[in-house]
Image (cartoon, helix red, strand yellow):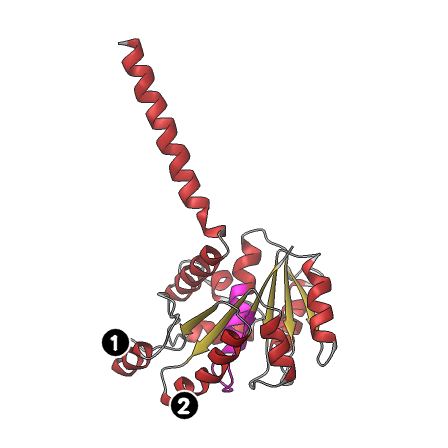
Amino acid sequence: MAKVITIAQQKGGAGKTTVAAHIAVALSQKGNRVAIIDIDPQGSLGCWHSIREERFGEGYTGLIFNSFSGWRVASEISRLRKQCDYIIVDSPPHTETEARTAIRSADLVVIPVQPSPTDLWATKATLELAKAEKVPVRVVMNRVAANSRLAQTIAAELPELTKATLGNRVLFAAALMEGRCATEVDPSSVAAHEVKELLKEILAIFNDGSEEEEVEQVAAKSSAKSKKKVLADA
């Protein structure tokens, strides 16, 4: 059964589509079957996916794309849950019907926030809605300039903040223009590293981030067995 991650923010221009696309591609690169749903009337995620189809070919984008609105939102999310590992929803910049449905249907709500007072103020409505629906939330600072004191001030006011932040990097926008993401264009870049760190935190919420711990535990047990064998042989 797929996990649903809704990218929500009442204020427009916070970078929802950038975050949605990068999380989706990063999940796909890990071998997951990922669906992306665009319910924002602006259709930015759909435009990006169209460019991606032109680049890689229809059916070869590594993602399942859907765009719809109204009463279909909940039913389509429910249908896709049976087909995918993850569903990423790019919701509209308000807290009306479609956005509320997307939040209600989510297993996690990710709220991108730029380091500005208006983003901070707008975030409160989305946080309250997610809280009312009892859906876990993570707030991610987006387009953060290096050593920004304002970003630190804004971050101090935000609950459920991720450790990972997304910088104000040209690569994020440049990659989207090509129908790609930073982790594809330059996997060793700082931008790609930021996306990977954010994804680690998201996966940890779903307990999918426990793989590394399991590997360490297996290695520890193997080491312990080796030591016992050495002692026995001695």
Instruction: Reply yes or no: does residue 22 show up in magenta.
Output: yes
Where is residue 27 shown, x and y percent of the image?
54, 58
The span from disc 2 to disc 1 (Cα, nearest Å) is: 20 Å
Instruction: Reply yes or no: does residue 205 show up in magenta.
Output: no
Badge 1 amino acid: Asn
Identify the secondary structure beneath mark 1.
loop
Q: Which residue is mark 2?
A: 118
Is there any visible trace of residue 58 in the rendered image?
no
Are the two marked residues, 2 and 1, in contact with CB atoms closer than 8 angstroms?
no
Q: Earlier in the sequence, mark 2 or mark 1?
A: 2
Which of the 4 image quadrants contains residue 186?
Answer: bottom left
Is there any visible trace of residue 207 in the rendered image?
yes
Where is residue 220 shown, x and y percent of the image?
35, 32
Check the image and report above or below for 225 versus 79. above
Q: Quadrant of the N terminus?
A: bottom right
In this view of the protein, which residue sits in the foreground, 47 or 152? 152
In this view of the protein, which residue sits in the foreground, 43 or 177? 43
Crowdedness near tag 2: few (<14), some (14–19) or many (≥20) residues, C-alpha within 10 Å: few
The mark tally for this picture is 2
Name which residue lies at 30% across and 9% down: 233
Badge 2 amino acid: Thr
Where is residue 108 shown, x and y percent of the image?
52, 66
Provide the residue span drawn in magenta. 6-23
Crowdedness near tag 1: few (<14), some (14–19) or many (≥20) residues, C-alpha within 10 Å: few
Name which residue lies at 38% across and 29% down: 221
Name which residue lies at 45% across and 87% down: 122
Which of the 4 image quadrants contains residue 152?
Answer: bottom left
Name which residue lies at 32% across and 77% down: 155
Q: Which residue is mark 1?
A: 147
